[in-house]
Image: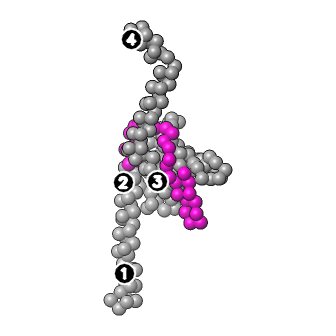
Amino acid sequence: MSAYMWDLFKNNKNYQARKVRNEAERRKKRAEKMGIPKLISDLYHHNIMYYPSWISHSREYVPAIVEKAVKQNDSYKEEKVEIILNNKIYLFGYKEVTMADDYGELELYINNNKVFAVSEDVYEDQYTTKHYPISVNAFVEGDWINDFQELDKQIKILEIKREKEKFENTEEISKLKKDFGL
């Protein structure tokens, strides 16, 4: 193929569309391989969405690297939570996108730029609601990933600390000694 024909082919809309689709698919697979969908979904639904309340009432449940958390929007089907993590502002948006409430989409923004989005299956029973990532809809790799991996580590450290304190609770141990003649 001549250089002229190759240039025509490269400038063809079909070629450009295929190139974009292939790169998007590659990035989607990279995000999945890195575990980003589960990481962000779990962090949001188990911790971050509660941080605005926890920061003012139960700060010991929020790692120190989270400086601030504000709920910007909280309606029946949509919520937005902004956090300041490691001196950076992150905005999470979550919305249920079906009437049956069995499907949702979680998005993460930095400076009004979407860096991650994932579609989720939502399962509810009388006790819990669980979110399972099913499809990466946006992924722009960057330093933000390290921030959320560090947040996950800090959460686990706090959980271990709370479990240890609960286990070693001297008041409870004293009561058990008395009640069981130990």
Disc on the earlier residue, 3 or 2: 3
- Residue matched to label 3: 42
| Amino acid bearing label 4 | Met
Alpha-carbon span between mark 1 and mark 3: 34 Å
- Please tell me whether mark 1 or mark 2 is closer to you in this view: 2
> Are there few (<14), some (14-19), or many (20+) residues within 10 Å of tag 1?
few
Which of the two discs, 4 and 1, labels the residue nearer the N terminus?
4
- Can residue 51 be seen here? no
Colour pattern of the rendering: one colour
Q: Residue under circle 2?
A: 153
Task: Identify residue type, mark 2.
Answer: Lys
| Distance CA(mark 1)–CA(mark 2) | 29 Å
Of the image marks 1 and 2, the number of the one nearer the N terminus? 2
What percent of the width, then of the height, locates residue 9?
45, 15
Q: Position of residue 29 (x, y in %)?
A: 41, 39
Residue 115 position (above or below residue 150): above
- Residue type beneath disc 1: Ile
Q: Which residue is mark 4?
A: 1
Which of the two discs, 3 and 4, sits closer to the camera?
A: 4
Vertical arrangement, residue 175 with respect to residue 162, above or below: below
Residue at 40% from the left image edge and 85% from the top image edge: 175
Tell me the SS state at disc 1.
Answer: helix
How many C-alpha atoms fall within 10 Å of the one at disc 3: few (<14), some, or many (≥20)?
some
Q: Secondary structure at mark 2?
A: helix
Left or right: where 88 falls relative to 124: left
The residue identified by callout 1 is: 173
Q: Which residue appears at 46% of the width and 33% of the height? A: 24
- Choose between 73 and 98: the one closer to the eye: 98
Residue 81 part of the magenta segment: no
Q: Position of residue 69 (x, y in %)?
A: 51, 50
Observer-side mark, 4 or 1, equals 4
Image quadrant holding the N terminus, namely top left
